[in-house]
Amino acid sequence: MNTFVTMNTFIEELTWRRMLQDSMPGTADLLASGPQKAYIGFDPTADSLGVGNLVQVMTLVHLQRAGHQPIALIGGATGMVGDPSFKASERTLLDEDTLAKNLAGQRRQLEKFLNFEGDNSARIVNNHDWFKDMNFLDFIRDVGKHITVNYMLAKDSVKSRMETGISFTEFSYQLIQGYDFYHLWKTSGVTIQIGGSDQWGNITTGTELIRRMGGGEAFALTTPLIKKADGSKFGKSEGGNIWLDPQRTSPYQFYQFWLNAGDEDASNYIRIFTILNQDEVLAIETEHAEAPHQRALQKALARDITARVHGEEALVSAMTASGILFGNATSESLQSLDEITLLEVFEGVPKMTISRAELAAGMPILDVVCADQALFQSRGEARKLIEAGGVSLNKIKCSPDQMVGLSDLLGDKHLLVQKGKKKYALVTLS
């Protein structure tokens, strides 16, 4: 049984988490009056949600924890049109097979965050279900006549495209999204739509349709668009978008994204993307301030969100992989890494190659560590450092007369050579 929390408490929750941008007058009063149904739409432009979508996902999580019913709308219909909101150019239209694949992928991810049991169980709906049987004439007659062109042109999302041009398809998007709100209000009693601040125009078109078509009243709430402290776009790394799908962004890369956040960003992200309460967050911030080099904020953030997206086992693997570069790993922990994670951890380090046949016959350690001269310029330099205990193979210190064989391989394919504390080379069999 879920305990209902008043909207004032919910507003306070969003406020201290820095997740509240705007709300229509009366929104707080409505939600304080009892459990409400609210929805957020997700654009199916890919078969995975990105970390940018997590702002809205976490808003639904907090909404449900406050006793309200969260509804996630995946846009099977709107995805065929494309939202023009503050985009510089027309979006590429997706075919039905691609949309179906994208919708299925996003649905699986949403199911990890929301509770689909109990009095305020979450729902996932697809707007294609109510648009598929509606023809164009019905739509412009029954819906289009209620909203004037002047009203639509006044929206910032449209005005920003007037100079570069906007197609009728994208121009009509706000009507389609507005009808979603009307349909959910009429058929399911949904009273609130939530979205990013760039969706305010589309959302209020929905409240206007509800007023004009149904004589009813509905409300809106928006969250701020997240940017990094330096003003750059949130959700991207040097390799591109950060996705929730482990096939697109591995758990190790995902963990590293959060771990590498700056202090100011981490203080913001830990509020938005975790379910840690205010006292817990403030305690972590205090700990971080006392010893910033320990990166308590980043570690707590990365652990929480990686575990919820990828599971505890993936988190342990990501933490193990992260520890290897900082010297606090064992040979056993190195052996536990799968090949993909191993290659990701040591991406950018020098690469060396030896033949499988040579290794099968047994190779002196000097021949292995001096392959391709990636780490050592001479065998004399290598021997001297080995004798001094400064060279390791797979995190085990080498001896001068050591022989290396196939049994030493990581995943039957690689060897890791370490020179001193911070220099590595990855040996791969040809």
Image (spheres, helix red, strand yellow):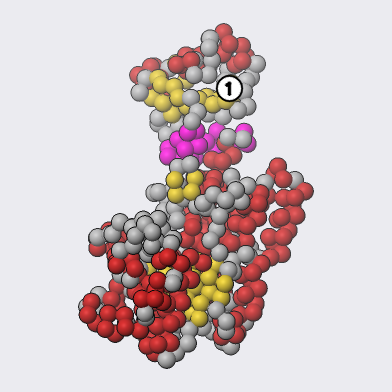
Q: Is residue 325 above or below residue 350?
A: below
Task: Tell whether position 337 is magenta.
Answer: yes
Quadrant (top left, top right, bottom left, bottom right) of the N terminus:
bottom right
Q: Going 45% across and 81% down the picture, which residue do you hit?
A: 207
Identify the magenta region.
327-347
Q: Residue 90: image x %, image y %?
A: 33, 58
Q: Residue 4: image x %, image y %?
A: 59, 82
Q: SS class of the residue under badge 1?
A: strand
Q: Residue 194: image x %, image y %?
A: 49, 73
Name the amino acid type tagged 1.
Lys
Q: Which residue is mark 1?
A: 419
In the image, 393 versus 370, the foreground residue is 370
- Residue 406 horizontal side relative to residue 268, left or right: left
Q: Is residue 94 above or below residue 395?
A: below
The quarter of the picture where residue 164 lies is bottom left
Specify the farthest residue to the top: 380
In the image, 261 versus 343, the foreground residue is 261
